[in-house]
Image (cartoon, helix red, strand yellow):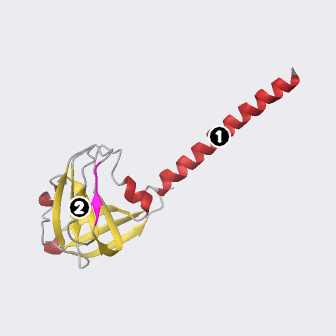
Amino acid sequence: MNARKAARNGVAGLIVAGLVLAFVVGRQQTRAATPTEFCTLHFSGGVMLEGVPVAKTPEQEARGLMHRDDAGPGMLFSWDKAEPRVFWMRNTRMPLSIGFMSADGTLFAIEDMQPNSDEYHFSQDPAQDALELAQGDFSRRGLGVGSRLLRRECQDRNTY
């Protein structure tokens, strides 16, 4: 009888430990996927976007604007070199537009993307940066193909 009770307590302890570990690991993954760098982006024509989060890690890039109800200030994806890029909208609840920028900051393509879609959106040309905004926000903010990202002022805001 005592052996059974000890075994049950041991199993219960393992289950609790597993749940705690899963919670801690899940929380760390969420932190890794949450941007901590935010930028003010200065474009040609005097256009300025403030408080734009930057996806810098693979986890942040993969998560993007998923599971949100509002695009807010959008999201900037930035890489060390220009290469062909691809995006999709899985688990993204609102329609977005994506703008692809060359190594010199020139916005060379803007494409509308529909919510919760697995359709791929390719950059066509090598892109060093990509900017996701709520659908229609590029034109509302005065940005179009040919606009150029001139400067970015970024701050690391550790949210935890």
Q: Is residue 10 above or below residue 146?
A: above
Give the number of the mark in front: 2 or 1.
Answer: 2
Q: Position of residue 106 (x, y in %)?
A: 19, 74
Going by the numbered disc 1, the residue's amino acid type is Gly
Going by the numbered disc 2, the residue's amino acid type is Phe
Label 2 sits on a secondary structure element that is strand
Label 1 sits on a secondary structure element that is helix
Q: Position of residue 54 (x, y in %)?
A: 36, 63
- Residue at 44% x, 55% y: name it: 33
Question: What is the spatial separation of the Cα atoms under label 2 and label 1, in whole angstroms?
Answer: 40 Å
From the image, which quarter does the N terminus lie in?
A: top right
- Residue at 67% x, 36% y: name it: 16
In terms of secondary structure, what is the magenta stretch mainly?
loop
Question: Is 57 placed left or right of 7 in the picture?
Answer: left
Give the mark, 2 or 1, whose residue is nearer the N terminus.
1
Q: Quadrant of residue 78?
A: bottom left
Tell me the magenta residue range: 85-89
Q: Quadrant of residue 142?
A: bottom left
How dense is the environment of label 1, judged by Cα within 10 Å: few (below 14), some, or many (20 and up)? few
Q: Residue furthest right?
A: 2
Q: Residue furthest bottom?
A: 104
Question: Is 48 placed left or right of 15 in the picture?
Answer: left
Q: Which residue is mark 2?
A: 122
Question: Does the stretch in magenta take in 126?
Answer: no
- Residue at 28% x, 51% y: name it: 71
Q: Nearer the viewer, residue 141 or 77?
A: 77
- Residue at 59% x, 43% y: name it: 22
Q: Position of residue 51 (x, y in %)?
A: 32, 61
How dense is the environment of label 2, judged by Cα within 10 Å: few (below 14), some, or many (20 and up)? some
Residue 145 circle label: none
Q: Which residue is mark 1?
A: 18
